[in-house]
Image (spheres, rainbow, N blue to C red):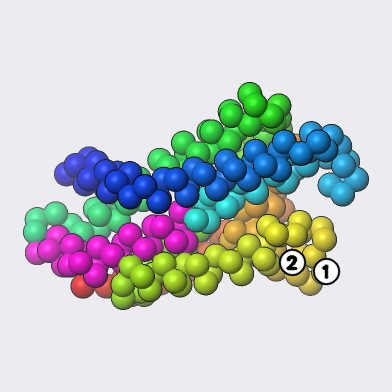
C-alpha cells in the first residue's frame, strides 16, 4: 500500500508543473548564473582563499532546494490533503493515514536527491565544480539538514488549516531564514551576533555545515546540535498536535 500511495503522490507532484520546475529550476539556475561568472572558479579572498563555486554557490543551491521542498511544498501538500478530506477518509479506512505522510516524504526526498545529484554531477561536468572534499561530513550535514528542515515543515503542516495557509506560513519562515542564515549575504559578512544566529537556524546551519564540508572542513558542533534540536523538538510537537481532519 505504501508503494501505491507513493506512486500516487509522485504523480500528483509531477502533474503540477510549477512544483518540479521550481524545485529543479531555481537551484540549477542559481548554480549556472553564479557559477558562470568569471571569478567563480578562482580562489577568492572574500572566501578565505577558497573557490566561491564550491565554498558558497553550490552549497547555497543545495540549501535553497531543501528549504523550498521542506518549508513550502511539503507542508502545503499535506495541509491540502487535510483540507480536501483525504486524511479523514484514510483514517476511516484500514490504511493508516500516517502512511500518506511517509509517501509524501519519500516523494520529496527523491526529488531532493535527484536535484542534489544534478547540482553535484552536473556542476562537475559543466562548471568544473569540485566534489565535496569531506564526503562523510557532507553526508552527515545533508542528512541532519534534511531531517531538521522537514521536521519544521511537518510542524507547519500540523498547524496550518489549509494548503494556502501552509504555503503562506512556510514562505514566512523560509525568507527570514534566507536572510538570517547567510544565504543572501555570506555568514562571514553578517554582524557578529547574527553569525551565531546563522549557525542556529536550520536553513543557515545546513548551508554553513555544507559549505565547510564541501571545502574539506568539518561542520561546527553548534550547527549539528542546532539541527538535531530542531529535528527532535519540531518532530515531537508535530506528532502531538497533528490533526487528521
Q: Is residue 143 shown left or right of residue 180?
A: left
Q: How many marks?
A: 2
Q: Is residue 182 shown left or right of residue 4?
A: right
The spot of residue 47 in percent (x, y) is 84, 47
Image quadrant of residue 53? top right
The spot of residue 17 in percent (x, y) is 36, 47
Residue placed most toward the observer, 102 or 228: 102
Q: Is 41 rendered above or below residue 206?
A: above
Dot 2 falls on a residue whose secondary structure is helix
Please say whether residue 7 is one of the residues in the magenta stretch: no
Give the extent of the magenta segment.
69-92
* On-image quarter of the N terminus: top left
Residue placed most toward the observer, 58 or 127: 127
Is residue 235 in view from this perspective?
A: no
Dot 1 falls on a residue whose secondary structure is helix
Residue shown at 40%/51% (left/top)? 18
The circle drawn on residue 192 is: 1
The spot of residue 204 in percent (x, y) is 65, 59
Using a 10 Å C-alpha cutoff, classify the residue at mark 1 as few (fewer than 14 neighbours), some (14 to 19) or many (20 or more).
few
Q: Is 4 rendered above or below residue 152?
A: above
The circle drawn on residue 161 is: none
The residue that mark 2 highlights is 196
Residue placed most toward the observer, 244 or 17: 17
| Separation (CA) of disc 2 from disc 1 | 7 Å
State the predominant SS element of the stretch in magenta: helix
* On-image quarter of the C terminus: bottom left
Is residue 157 in view from this perspective?
A: yes
Amino acid at each position: 500500500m505504501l508503494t501505491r500511495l507513493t506512486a500516487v503522490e509522485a504523480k500528483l507532484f509531477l502533474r503540477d508543473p510549477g512544483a518540479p520546475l521550481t524545485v529543479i529550476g531555481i537551484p540549477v539556475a542559481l548554480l549556472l548564473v553564479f557559477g558562470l561568472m568569471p571569478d567563480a572558479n578562482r580562489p577568492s579572498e572574500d572566501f578565505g582563499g577558497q573557490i566561491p563555486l564550491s565554498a558558497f554557490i553550490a552549497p547555497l543551491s543545495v540549501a535553497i532546494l531543501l528549504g523550498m521542498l521542506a518549508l513550502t511544498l511539503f507542508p502545503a501538500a499535506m495541509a491540502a490533503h487535510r483540507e480536501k478530506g483525504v486524511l479523514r477518509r484514510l483514517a476511516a479506512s484500514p490504511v493508516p493515514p500516517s502512511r500518506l505522510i511517509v509517501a509524501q516524504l519519500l516523494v520529496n526526498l527523491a526529488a531532493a536527491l535527484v536535484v542534489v545529484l544534478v547540482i553535484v554531477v552536473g556542476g562537475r561536468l559543466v562548471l568544473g565544480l569540485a566534489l565535496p572534499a569531506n564526503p562523510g561530513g557532507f553526508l552527515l550535514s545533508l542528512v541532519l539538514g534534511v531531517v531538521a528542515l522537514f521536521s519544521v515543515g511537518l510542524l507547519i503542516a500540523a498547524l496550518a488549516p489549509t494548503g494556502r495557509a501552509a504555503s503562506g506560513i512556510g514562505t514566512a519562515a523560509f525568507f527570514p531564514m534566507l536572510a538570517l542564515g547567510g544565504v543572501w549575504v555570506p555568514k562571514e559578512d553578517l554582524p557578529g551576533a547574527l553569525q551565531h544566529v546563522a549557525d542556529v537556524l536550520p536553513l543557515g546551519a545546513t548551508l554553513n555545515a555544507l559549505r565547510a564540508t564541501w571545502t574539506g572542513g568539518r561542520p561546527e558542533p553548534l550547527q549539528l546540535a542546532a539541527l538535531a534540536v530542531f529535528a527532535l523538538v519540531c518532530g515531537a510537537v508535530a506528532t502531538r498536535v497533528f490533526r487528521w481532519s
